Image (spheres, rainbow, N blue to C red):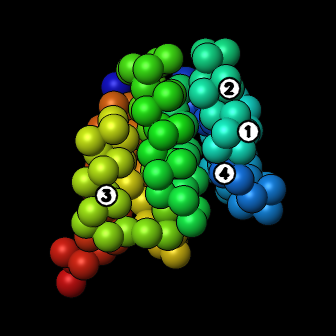
Amino acid sequence: MSVDERNSVGVKLLIVDDHTAVRNGMRSLAIAAGIAIAGEAKVFGAAAMAREGNADVVLLGINSSLIRGLDALSQIKEIRPDLPILVYALDDSPFAVAKARERGAHGYFAKGRDEPMLVEAIQRVAVGEEIRNVKERDADQP
């Protein structure tokens, strides 16, 4: 299924971040792009929200604690192994990206990238594409 086909069906997004302001911003961005919100949670509550089974894709915000975010990623994958997860993080080091991939992330988006690129990344992950660190993709382009 292509991104365009998936958009006509509708993507349901679970937003996970410890900061209310970030969740609010992500919700506004998603709704403006026609993406439905399946739920919102702090990192600690992410697995419980994923268990409900409403989401098509998870946007997992990882802040200062990479380990805690990666643990949440692993817990979500244990509950719903096929649920695509896009990690949204400040730390875009090769180590962080590799660790997220090892735990099952379908994509890694560096905070600070353009909002339209984040929407595109969510849509691509929702249709089963795996994407690399979006910051790396930016560097590849002229």
Residue 16 falls in which quadrant of the image? top right
Label 4 sits on residue: 17
Residue type marked 4: Asp
Query: Dot 2: within a 10 Å radius of its alpha carbon, few (fewer than 14), some, or many (20 or more) residues?
Result: many
Tell me which numbered mark, 1 or 4, is placed earlier along the sequence: 4
Q: Are marks 3 and 4 in contact (CB under 8 Å)?
A: no
Query: Dot 1: within a 10 Å radius of its alpha carbon, few (fewer than 14), some, or many (20 or more) residues?
Result: many
Q: Which mark is residue 97?
A: 3
Residue shown at 42%/60% (left/top)? Answer: 109
Query: Dot 4: within a 10 Å radius of its alpha carbon, few (fewer than 14), some, or many (20 or more) residues?
Result: many
Label 2 sits on residue: 49
Q: Secondary structure at mark 2?
A: helix
Q: Secondary structure at mark 4?
A: loop
Q: Position of residue 9 (x, y in %)?
A: 55, 24
Residue type marked 3: Val
The answer to whether residue 54 is left or right of residue 124 is right
Residue 78 makes an appearance in the image: yes
Residue 139 falls in which quadrant of the image? bottom left
Q: Comparing marks 3 and 1, which lies closer to the viewer?
A: 3
Residue type marked 2: Met
Tell me which numbered mark, 3 or 1, is placed earlier along the sequence: 1
**Which quadrant does the N terminus fall into?**
top left
Tell me which numbered mark, 3 or 4, is placed earlier along the sequence: 4
Residue shown at 79%/62% (left/top)? Answer: 21
Q: Which mark is residue 11?
A: none
Label 1 sits on residue: 40
Q: Are marks 1 and 4 in contact (CB under 8 Å)?
A: no
Q: Are marks 2 and 1 in contact (CB under 8 Å)?
A: yes
Cα gap from disc 3 to disc 1, whole angstroms: 23 Å
Residue shown at 38%/54% (left/top)? Answer: 108
Q: Secondary structure at mark 1?
A: strand
The answer to whether residue 80 is left or right of residue 140 is right
